[in-house]
Amino acid sequence: MASCGKGRSGQKGRGAALKKLMGTAASLLVLLAAVLGLTVTNGGKLPTWEQLYALFGVSELMPQLPEQAQNAATKIHFIDVGQGDAVLIEQDGCFALIDAGERDAAETLVAYLRAAGVDRLTLLVMTHPHTDHIGGMRAVLDAFPVDAVLLPDFTKAPMPATSTFTKLLEAVAEKRIPAETACTGDTFAVGSGTLTVLGDGIETENLNDLSLVTMFEAPGLRYFSSGDGEKPVERAVLDSGAGVRADLYKAAHHGSSTSNTRELLETVRPRAVVISCGKDNSYGHPHREAMETFGEVGASVFRTDECGTVIVYVDDAGAMQVAVTNKEAA
């Protein structure tokens, strides 16, 4: 796997949305005047992007992180893309994206990635080919260089025939991006961290059960994810004897009762669970059974429909911390 270059700072990337708004010459003069004015107000120090966002009324895309978290080596971003999944792993200025939400959230996703400081992706992972996980991937491929794409094993299920899926594979081929079918035991470097495939799906007619099961490990954090994998996928990974113990767990299938079994949760024993789901979604996610299980294993629960984007990071003391967009919901 190709290593990524030195990442840009978060503040540098977070200016992308504002720069786009300030595209004309006249607007640039206004921006310059604002920078000079805020520099005077700051006692000679250049303004932060947060100050510029506030001045021009541009909504923040990212949670307001504590100062020590700004340069944290390890961050996991659970991006609020509505009823879908998009998780950005950030390690030492390198980035991997797992899933990319629905197509109608693609613009929001790309803007968020830029705001987070992404200028290239070491790895783009498709857990499985449902549109709420791959809808924004074409936009991501168009916006950023991608070193490699990791795909589920399509020999285990009927080949998807949606135009979103077909056009995505065509884009990967056109851009000549190396694409690899995941196999259990595969490992991929993301900075100094490692993403390991713990499960590569099962023989199925249900595309949810093609979902890749992964573990990301970095100093101070183990993060377990299984896409939309349902109970047979969870059973398979437990039967494999894989080490699934983790500090952080993304609720499978948006917190559905089809997944998130008590046996799995008692084995993972997460301290925090993040649920990616849309507000008032028609599926009723997260389901009551799953929420009860999360509570029974003693995990703190964060929902994107209530908290907005959730960022889990490792602080200076090596402890896992959580920041959210909507602080009132935390």
Image: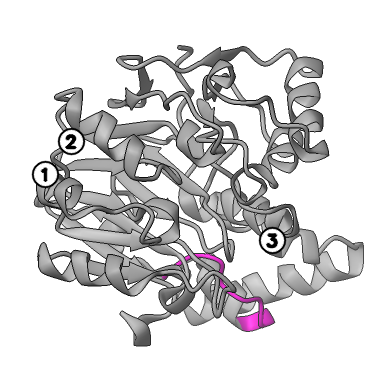
Look at label 1 and name its amino acid: Thr
In the image, what residue type sits under mark 3? Answer: Ala
Say left or right for 104 vs 249.
right
Residue 66 in view here: no
Question: Which of pointers 3 and 2 lies earlier in the amino acid sequence?
Answer: 3
Closer mark to the observer between disc 3 and disc 2 = 2
Element type at mark 1: helix
Q: Position of residue 307 (x, y in %)?
A: 41, 75
**Disc 3, SS:** helix
Residue corresponding to mark 2: 244
The disc placed on residue 17 is 3
Q: Earlier in the sequence, mark 3 or mark 1?
A: 3
Tell me which residue sits at (46%, 18%) in the image: 182
Q: Secondary structure at mark 2?
A: loop
Q: Which residue is mark 1?
A: 267
Callout 3: 10 Å neighbours few (<14), some, many (20+)?
Answer: some
Q: Is residue 32 above or below residue 197?
A: below
Question: Are discs 2 and 1 less than 8 Å apart at CB?
Answer: yes
Q: Quadrant of the C terminus?
A: bottom left
Q: Which is closer to the viewer, label 3 or label 1?
A: 1
